[in-house]
Image (spheres, rainbow, N blue to C red):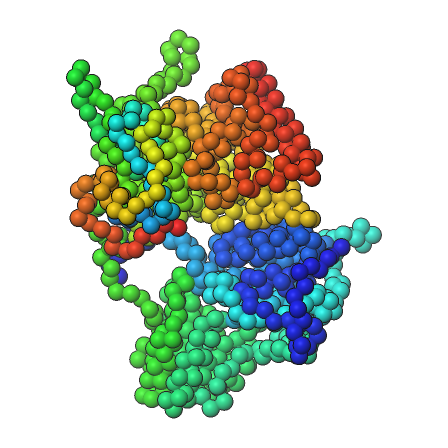
Amino acid sequence: MVATTKKPKRTPGLPNGQTLGFKTGNEMAAMAAKHINFHIMGYFPITPSTEIAEYLDEMYAEGEHDIRLIAADGEHGGAGICYGASTGGGRVFNATSSQGLLYSLEQFPVQSGTRFPMVLDLVTRSINGPLDIRGDHSDLYFTLNTGWIILLARDPQAVYDLNILAVRLSEHPDVRLPVIVAYDGFFTSHQKRQVTYFEDMEPVQGFVGNYQATHTTLDPRNPITVGPYMNDPDLINNKYQLNLAMEAAYRVLPDILQEYGKLSGRTYPVVDCYKMEDAEVALVLLNSAAETAKDVADQLREQGLKVGVVSPNVLRPFPAEEIREAIGNTKAVLIAERADSYGGHGNALTHEVKSALKDDPENRTLCLSRIYGLGGKDFLNEDAEALFRLALEAADTGKVKKLFDYHGVTPSNPSNGNASRVLPPFTKEEMSPGLVSAARDPETGELRVQTPPLWKLATRSRIIAPGHGACPGCGMFPAIDQLFKGMEGDIVVLYQTGCAMVVTTGYPFSSHRVNYIHNLFQNGAATLSGLVEMFHEKQRRGELPEGEDITFVMVTGDGGMDIGMGSAIGAALRNHKMIILEYDNQGYMNTGSQLSYSTPIGHMTSTSHVGTAQGGKASHHKDTLQIMAACHLPYVFSSVEGYADDLVKKAAKAQWYARNEGLAYGKVLISCPLNWRVADEVGTDIVQEAVDCNFFPLYEIEQGRTKITYDPEAVGRKIPVGQWLGKMGKTRHMTRPEYKAQIEAFETEVERRWRRLKAMHEHPDL
Amino acid sequence: MDAAIGGTVIDGGNSVLKNLTASRNGYIPAFHRDECVDCALCDLVCPDFCFVWDLEEKEDGTQATRLRGIDYKFCKGCMKCIDACPTEALSWDREIEGYADAHRVPLFPKLEDRSSSTPSSTG
């Protein structure tokens, strides 16, 4: 049942019950999804598209729509959820960006090749590496060959309108293809613009109509086989059908645009042409940059220069005829692209525009190609003017001086990585102060660790330099520092994408005083395992100095252990000599506090809102340590930032096992004052309470033997979970009477896991 | 254009050139040497590694770790250290203009003539 709340005021004069607003692209995407009321959204948070799921979750918590929102284990999983759901003959939605798109790219041809409609909003963003969260089109270009229709939304209004149109186009009986609606990350996704939208969902529902799927896997009386094994000579026919569907989309799109125009008062052309009637020179470019170019075209027109701007609203199917018609009579055009096809002398738009012109044998238009705005670099009026001037020069001289180039590369900056070292590298002696030792007791075989009093470790060299950008009170660095305080010798670290990575390596700065690598969090463990084996192989071949001893440590958040679980399990099963440290702050804090699988039940995050129809996260927290323990690792441990003595000792053991036996895994609960909604200074006390209520037991599993290293009951410090939950803004609601059942369920689960752990502690075979 | 290829930062640790003073929100941990027992609990909870230590030779020839002060250039004012301190050696003070400069103990004295080449960003 959908209850429409927070009704905006209907604006007189707008057709069919529409209202005016001032909203961002992401807000408009969420609004469109709500009005379409998709059955399912499978997604994984990634900047800058994350807000769409956040807004939808917030609306869901207040009962404003029925979309079942499913937070996936990664974008690959998200695409799988969407694919599976779409075979059931319902409406499906997803939103992603950048690496998320690339991680799920494999699924795109599956979706289109088996012909199941859905809508995906691609909030365009630069792709790694190095990692850049800002907007360019390097992700978008990867979708060109996937068999998806691609609509381009240049502003928040178009985001709303094209999302609604996308459903109709996608489900058209002659089309039956998935559709991407692409809009510019940050420029369009995060900037507010004046918009018009339907007050209620009814006009949108009327426009999209009922979806009658060609095939459904949910009709047992009419069973079908989706995705057979198909070789030659059949596959080419399947692809020809897809080609025909694209041609059909090209054919029916103008009609759908017209029909939507009648409903909304906004009619989109297939190709947006600005002042092109008499233009001698034009810029061809995609999405928000075209709007900048239009402003500059006006200015140049005042100087008597006949310039215009061409920008397609659809990229697949490519509107070759409309483009040829728009620019065929110009003297020169410059095709500007926000992504390169390195070595291709221009990306796809350049070559497709050129080929559209080439199909007219009489055409004499000169074409230039420029790459601009990579990594989200602003495209300002002066940039648009510079590009117009290049094209004007070609038109005047009848010659193209340089066919292809980059626009906007900055000259040398001596501070960019090549400056002399600010801090000297640590010596071998500094890395091995001899404060900590670990050795097997020759008689009992037990691993014995010797650590000094904690104050003695204060002068130990720190491998992370100050000046990092973590939020005040963040628990990450005390925990990571305490881990390294328990180790001796050289260290190489790999940080998976996440808070610790972002705040320590903002270019041209780095806080890492030892060798450091970043890789995306689907793959950090595999990456580090490769380096571990390179180390041992080089050592075996005598290519490294005698006695070189390096400990390899991967640092990841709990989010990295969701999307990177498979990679971590793979590394664990191969038992490489390395350590994985997971800092668990119970959410995807780097992207704005979305739920992780480690987020406990009932906790409020930006994708598990608390409202009248939803009370925080619906499922229990993941027991990552037991999952890793099931790989039968030599050493698994838990600790918290508040128990330095415990963490230092466990770190020393982890290093011994990583040197001698194989992979050691540690999970450390750390505070995130910002997203736990607590004061900066209380994080250490709160993680202590998480331990004292048995939510986060401190224990280790050494070669299969479980040992609880701190038992709150034994020392009379056991507290109920409610006491801990009452301390945090994200969980305070759980202490209210209406959440009694939920908090009891939580306590029951916490106690069940604790009793299980105690049994394992007591029995050597468990 | 003369940057190292691949975006590699050759100069790890150069974040010490940053000044994070602007992250503080009007309060500052004040250090009172007379009350300090050098237990280092403050140092263990500090997210920003601001505490400056000396190794001192004791009369019996052994070395002792002694807290010299705080490098306020890196302190974001989270006040975790005050919570951790078992004595009265750290106090929660309203930051008065000039206090940090007057009481700051540089963690990297050799770098005092170098400053950040780009504006600090504290995320």
Residue B60: where, in percent of width, then height?
18, 15
Q: Position of residue A97 (x, y in %)?
A: 51, 57
Residue A414 vs A288, above or below: the answer is above
Seen at 31% across and 66% down, the residue is A409
- Please state which of residues A526 and A59 is positioned toward the viewer in this rendering: A59
**From the image, which quarter does the C terminus of chain A lie in?**
top right
> Picture coordinates of residue A477 (x, y %)?
38, 37
Q: Position of residue B41 (x, y in %)?
A: 35, 28
For image coordinates 65% across by 42% down, the residue present is A618
Q: Residue furthest right?
A: A221
- A505 vs A233, nearest the viewer: A505
Q: Quadrant of residue A527?
A: top left
In depth, the one of A22 and A60 nearer the eye is A22
Name the image quarter holding the N terminus of chain A.
bottom right
Q: Residue furthest top?
A: A443
Residue plotted at (33% across, 50% down): B22
| Residue closer to the observer: A607 or A417 | A607
